[in-house]
């Protein structure tokens, strides 16, 4: 028989029992659909985690003061004044070649008009590190950050909404610690940080102005601030952290037996651990979903075995008029393959819709894994062949005389 004839006979046989065929395909449909949806959701969740940490800073290392010990008790992070302006200058001067951006960051909670918010003093490199641009207006420049010129401020979207509702804040005057500041820019929306804090609830002013008006008398040390360090590429983070540690230990005259008097937080490591956890959960869900494919395959085998029994007389007639065992085996194998293939196509559509719904519900990007979809469809075909092979072989081995005598 030709391939076309075999397919025609397969579709005719399946259509004859269309309700049973559809119920058989449900296992394949739900198996393929859930595998696609789970893998797509896993990728979406992984990317959502990555976006959160990218919003906190690009390849970011945060250097803070260490812990002060008194009477055997540690005072906690930042209790020991160790970071100096000379440390910050050395990093800006390129003594660690893998570092791209460096800026001190000072922050405190202040009442601004009728809204209590976070006020940050820093340099323009802060916006580069956090990949943060102005949605409206402009950002302050290096001269404003280092010379203490006009008192200007850049505000987050939350502050802009709370203070000015739908009107433009650009050019408006806000008072911080009773000092007037001109709003020159509104930042793009960042959303929540990895710690659940609203990053848009902020006012950012030049570092020099912050030190003059809000945190006087720091002298040689940076006691209440941090140093943000952005590494050129993600692959350089570990190397940069090692070089940074060596440089600071040397500048602080620490011996081999001395503990670090500073702390370095590597957000990339935290983000990676979060992504791995998300990926493990997604993989587990995909494995559970793949089990339904096996259940679907068992359903295909069961139905094909029933079909062989029901059509025993038909098989005998075909073999009596000249059909070879290979023709009979091919027909039943093609029927099971058609069941799996049609179920696979419907399952791909179901999986895409489910993935779209989950992406919309959880607010992450939609990923439709084309490679996974192709692989799942191939697996569906493999399920049809593997689980349809035994019924097909059994049909081909029927004795024509016995089959002709069989009565349903």
Image (cartoon, grey):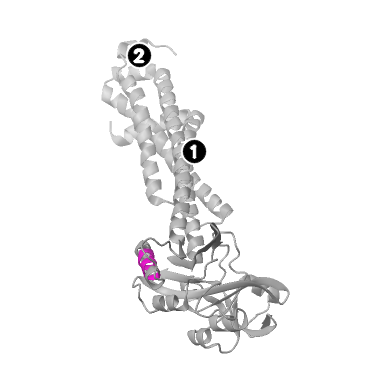
**Image position of 109 (left or right of 40):** right
State which region is magenta: 241-248
- Gap in angstroms between the C-alphas marked 1 and 2: 36 Å
- Residue 203 in percent (x, y) is at 61, 75
Look at 60% across and 62% down and name the residue there. 197
- Residue 261 appears in the figure: yes
Residue extending furthest right?
114
Q: Quadrant of residue 174?
A: bottom right
Q: Is residue 94 above or below residue 314?
A: below
Q: Residue 211 or 319: which is nearer the viewer?
A: 211
Residue extending furthest front?
71
- Residue 123 in percent (x, y) is at 50, 79
N-term-proximal mark, 1 vs 2: 1
Label 2 element class: helix
Q: Is residue 59 above or below residue 398?
A: below
Residue 264: which disc?
Answer: none
Crowding at mark 2 (Cα within 10 Å: few <14, some 14-19, many 20+)? many
Which mark is nearer the camera, 1 or 2? Answer: 1
Look at 73% across and 74% down and name the residue there. 114
Residue 403: which disc?
Answer: 2
Q: Which residue is mark 1?
A: 30
- Residue 139 appears in the figure: no
Crowding at mark 1 (Cα within 10 Å: few <14, some 14-19, many 20+)? many
- Residue 41 in percent (x, y) is at 49, 49
Is 244 within the magenta? yes
Q: Residue 12 or 34: which is nearer the viewer?
A: 34
């Amino acid at each position: 028989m030709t391939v076309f004839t075999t397919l025609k006979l397969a579709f005719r046989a399946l259509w004859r029992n269309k309700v049973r065929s559809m119920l058989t395909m449900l296992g394949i449909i739900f198996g393929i659909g859930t595998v696609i949806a789970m893998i797509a959701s896993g990728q979406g969740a992984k990317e959502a985690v990555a976006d959160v940490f990218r919003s906190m800073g690009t390849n970011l290392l945060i250097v803070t003061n260490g812990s002060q010990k008194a009477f055997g008790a540690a005072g906690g992070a930042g209790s020991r004044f160790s970071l100096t302006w000379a440390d910050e200058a050395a990093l800006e001067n390129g003594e660690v070649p893998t570092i791209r951006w460096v800026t001190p960051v000072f922050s405190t909670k202040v009442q601004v008009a009728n809204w209590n918010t976070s006020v940050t003093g820093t340099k323009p490199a802060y916006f580069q590190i956090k990949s943060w641009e102005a949605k409206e207006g402009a950002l302050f420049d290096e001269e404003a950050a280092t010379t203490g010129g006009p008192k200007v401020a850049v505000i987050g979207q939350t502050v802009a909404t709370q203070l000015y509702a739908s009107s433009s804040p650009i050019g408006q005057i806000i008072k911080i610690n009773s000092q007037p500041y001109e709003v020159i820019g509104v930042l793009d929306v960042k959303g929540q940080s990895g710690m659940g804090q609203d990053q848009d609830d902020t006012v950012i002013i030049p570092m020099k102005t912050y030190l003059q008006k809000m945190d006087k008398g720091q002298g040689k040390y940076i006691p209440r601030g941090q140093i943000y360090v952005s590494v050129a590429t993600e692959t350089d983070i570990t190397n940069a952290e090692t070089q940074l540690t060596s440089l600071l230990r040397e500048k602080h005259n620490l011996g081999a037996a001395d503990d670090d008097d500073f702390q370095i937080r590597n957000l990339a490591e935290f983000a990676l651990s979060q992504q791995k956890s998300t990926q493990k959960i997604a993989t587990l869900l995909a494995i559970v979903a793949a089990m339904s494919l096996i259940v679907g395959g068992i359903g295909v085998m069961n139905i094909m075995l029933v079909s062989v029994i029901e059509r025993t007389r038909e098989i005998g007639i075909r073999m009596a008029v000249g059909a070879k065992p290979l023709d009979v085996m091919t027909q039943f194998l093609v029927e099971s393959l058609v069941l799996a293939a049609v179920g696979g196509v419907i399952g791909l559509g179901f999986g895409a819709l489910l993935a779209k719904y989950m992406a919309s519900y959880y607010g992450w990007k939609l990923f439709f894994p084309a490679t996974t979809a192709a692989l799942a469809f191939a697996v569906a075909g493999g399920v049809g062949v593997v689980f349809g092979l035994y019924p097909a072989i059994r049909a081909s081995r029927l004795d024509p005389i016995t089959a002709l005598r069989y009565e349903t």
